Amino acid sequence: MTFSISLTVNGVRRNVELADPRVTLLDLLRERLDLTGTKKGCDRGQCGACTVLVGGRRINSCLALAISHDGADVLTIEGVARGNQLHPVQAAFIAHDGLQCGFCTPGQIMSAIGLIREGHAGDNPERVREAMSGNLCRCGAYAGITEAVLEAQKILATAEQRRSA
């Protein structure tokens, strides 16, 4: 028996046949849709390397069954830049050395984007660290990550104010 699901991934509608209802969203993205930017770290929801946005909210895609997200809007790291223009969070990560080996970076960036969209970033570094605590960095680039999130949040807030004016 196969199961048909339809997802909008990075703005593109994708119809997928699943032979196994136990396929995770992470495995669907990586193995079926060739979106390998989302990383498989611990595969237990403890490291955050697999973070994507579903309906604008951060989730660990390794814990999410693909079939349970039929009809969902999924944003992965591959969908955040606009052509050659990096997303402000991506640019801030580069500017603040918020990465070293880069393995955790896609999940960190997706979590930061979600955090900012949720309105939880504020201007308090401790608050950012707490809200990003589900994303681990084995290299210890936390200071740069925190600075990047704070800067990107300011840039995005300024851009939003300009659009509103």
Image (spheres, rainbow, N blue to C red):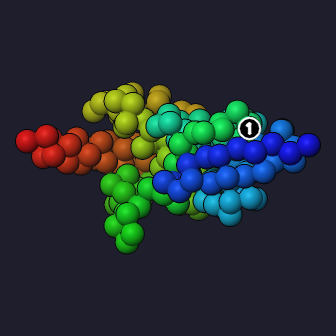
The residue drawn where x is 37% and y is 72% is 84
Residue holding disc 1 = 67
Total labels drawn = 1
> Closest to the observer: 7 or 135?
7
Q: Secondary structure at mark 1?
A: helix
Q: Residue at x 24, y 48 (%)?
A: 155
Residue beneath the point at 65% across and 46% down: 6
Q: Is residue 42 at all visible to an observer of this figure?
A: no
In the picture shown, does residue 66 fall above or below 34? above
Q: Is residue 44 visible?
A: yes
Crowding around mark 1 (Cα neighbors within 10 Å: few <14, some 14 to 19, many 20+) is: many
The picture places residue 165, in percent across and down from the top left corner, at 8, 42
Q: Is residue 92 left or right of residue 28?
A: left
Residue found at the very far bottom of the displayed protein: 84
Instruction: Give 129 or 162, whichever is nearer the viewer.
Output: 162
> On the rendered structure, is 139 left or right of 15?
left
From the top left corner, tell me how far across and down residue 125 is, in percent.
Answer: 35, 34
**On screen, residue 132 above or below 52:** above
Residue farthest right in this picture? 1
Q: Residue at x 37, y 57 (%)?
A: 87
Q: Most extreme residue toward the left, as rendered?
A: 165
Image check: 161 left or right of 153? left
| Amino acid type, mark 1 | Ile
Screen quadrant of the N terminus: top right
**Picture coordinates of residue 70 (x, y %)?**
66, 38
